[in-house]
Amino acid sequence: MGFFEPYKQGYLLRIKLSPGASSCGFRGLFADVEQNLWLKISITTVPEKGKANKELIKMLAKELKLSQNLFEIVSGITDHMKKIYIENTDSAIYEKLQQLEKGLTK
């Protein structure tokens, strides 16, 4: 299983966010102790008053070519480890997530 899985009417993403970084980007995947994969993302925005979360959603929406209002942080609002729900069952989203994962595992 990858960093995403079907959930409700869309997908649940597991994200490890590194705010306050020197640059923004997708930094790879890592497995936790339970062998769940997490997508590592760094952003330059500092984690204050939800600014980093907003930047994360903006970055994901741009990468997946989706509206920001389709994303919801379901856990980890104030943590680096986040679970984000995308409300969209379009098969194109699944393919984009798979391509993102493949690009990070080369």
Image: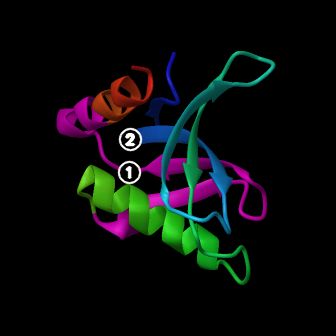
Measured Cα–Cα span from mark 1 to mark 2: 5 Å
* Circle number at residue 104: none
The residue at 26%/37% (across/down) is 96
Q: How is the image coloured?
A: rainbow
The residue at 60%/65% (across/down) is 22
**Where is residue 59 shown, x and y percent of the image?**
41, 62
Q: Is residue 55 visible?
A: yes
The residue at 38%/42% (across/down) is 9
Q: Secondary structure at mark 1?
A: loop
Classify 10 Å Cα crowding around label 2: few (below 14), some (14-19), many (20 and above). some
Type of amino acid under label 2: Gly
**Where is residue 74 shown, x and y percent of the image?**
63, 54
60 with respect to 21 (left or right):
left
Asked whether disc 1 touches disc 2, contact meaning CB atoms under 8 Å apart, the reply is yes
Range shown magenta: 67-96
**Where is residue 88 shown, x and y percent of the image?**
31, 47
As drawn, 37 above or below 97: above
Q: Which residue is mark 1?
A: 87
Q: For this rendering, which residue is in front, 38 or 19?
A: 19
Image quarter where the C terminus lies is top left
As drawn, 74 above or below 36: below
Q: Which residue is mark 2?
A: 10
Classify 10 Å Cα crowding around label 1: few (below 14), some (14-19), many (20 and above). some
